[in-house]
């Protein structure tokens, strides 16, 4: 079996969960990962989830969702360490 087909093989239970789709919209991805769109945006901004662009549309590969779902994530994913702007 070729390396690029290992994760997305017919024997992988995630393949069944993805219904054979290769790319997902942001809202589909958030729903599959059971996170909010805002959290998904933060993860994308921190390059913890890689995306693909088709024209203006942002899509997330099924392999990237599977990779992210199979890892442990400790802490608050949307936590920001500093505030922007000055208090008046």
Image (cartoon, rainbow, N blue to C red):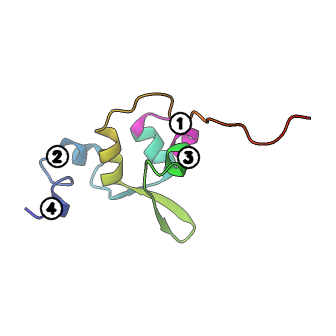
Q: Which mark is residue 12?
A: 2
Chain-order first, disc 3 or disc 4: 4
Q: Residue at x 21, y 54 (%)?
A: 8
Q: Decide if residue 81 is on the left or right side of residue 2.
A: right
> Compared to 4, does 49 lie above or below?
above
Neighbour class for label 3 at 10 Å: few (<14), some, many (≥20)?
Answer: some
Contact (CB < 8 A) between labels 1 and 3?
A: no
Chain-order first, disc 1 or disc 4: 4
Percent position of residue 44, x then y:
50, 50
- Specify start and end residues of the magenta stretch as a single range: 33-41
Q: Which mark is residue 36?
A: 1
Percent position of residue 83, x then y:
72, 37
Chain-order first, disc 2 or disc 3: 2
Where, quadrant-wise, is the N terminus in this rendering? Answer: bottom left
Closer to the camera in the image, 19 or 30: 30
Judged from the image, the secondary structure of the residue bearing numbered disc 2 is loop
Q: Which residue is mark 3?
A: 41
- Mark 4 or 2: the one toward you: 4
**How many numbered discs sit on the rendered protein?**
4
What whole-number distance in Å separates the C-alpha atoms at marks 4 and 2?
Answer: 14 Å
Chain-order first, disc 1 or disc 3: 1
Contact (CB < 8 A) between labels 1 and 4?
A: no
Q: Which residue is mark 4?
A: 3
Q: Is residue 56 magenta?
A: no
């Amino acid at each position: 079996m070729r390396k690029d087909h290992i994760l997305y093989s017919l024997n992988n239970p995630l393949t069944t969960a993805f219904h054979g789709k290769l790319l997902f919209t942001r809202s589909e991805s958030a729903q599959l990962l059971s996170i909010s769109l805002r959290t998904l945006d933060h993860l994308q901004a921190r390059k913890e989830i890689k995306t693909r662009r088709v024209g203006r549309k942002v899509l997330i590969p099924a392999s990237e969702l599977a990779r992210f779902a199979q890892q442990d994530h400790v802490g608050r994913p949307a936590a920001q360490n500093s505030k922007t702007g000055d208090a008046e």
